[in-house]
Image: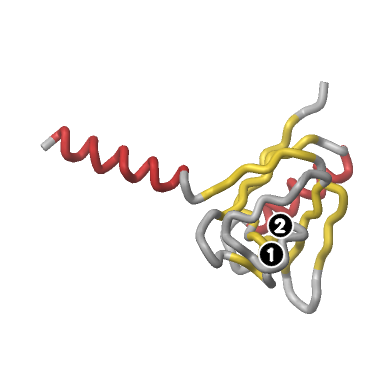
Amino acid sequence: MRLFILFLMLIGFSVSTFSQTMSVGTIKAIRTGLNSEQFTIVTNEQYQNPAGCFKPDGYVADSSHKGYYTYYAAALMAFMERSQIAVTISNKPGDCINGRPRLIGINLQRGK
């Protein structure tokens, strides 16, 4: 029984790791609005598009999703400080917002 529970836990952890992709770089621009509570970060690096979105020119977060305000605060800080970031985006097919990859996390990295 313990082995079975351990097996289920390992499967759960491996599935969650496959549901995201990381992109490392700096933020070149932040776009907001378009009559909705969302923002897009534009990076200096080539865009990752694992969800197959039709307009992969930035990563989008919408206020209806958990973590929106945390992502927005981190994006603003990284932009102002010109910090290196690691952007986490969704791998789920079709998980796009306005045709762009969905942002699900931002990790800030302190410069030297």
**Quadrant showing the C terminus:** top right
Residue tagged 1: 100
Q: Quadrant of residue 59?
A: bottom right
Please report the residue visible at 73 percent of the width from the left and 32 percent of the height from the top: 109
Q: Quadrant of residue 9?
A: top left
Q: Amino acid at mark 1?
A: Arg
Asked whether 12 or 64 is in front, the reply is 12
Seen as rendered, the residue at the extreme bottom is: 35
Callout 1 touching callout 2 (CB < 8 Å): yes
**Picture coordinates of residue 23 (x, y %)?**
68, 43
Q: Residues within 10 Å of mark 2 (few under 14, many from 20)?
A: many
Q: Is residue 63 visible?
A: no
Please report the residue visible at 49 percent of the width from the left and 50 percent of the height from the top: 19
Q: Residues within 10 Å of mark 1 (few under 14, many from 20)?
A: many
Q: Amino acid at mark 2?
A: Tyr
Q: Quadrant of residue 22?
A: top right
Q: Earlier in the sequence, mark 1 or mark 2?
A: 2
Q: Is residue 1 left or right of residue 58?
A: left
Query: Above or below — where is 44 with respect to 101?
Result: above
Assign a secondary structure to mark 2: strand
Assign a secondary structure to mark 1: strand
3D distance between C-alphas at marks 1 and 2? 6 Å
Q: Is residue 4 visible?
A: yes
Residue tagged 2: 59
**Picture coordinates of residue 70 (x, y %)?**
67, 51
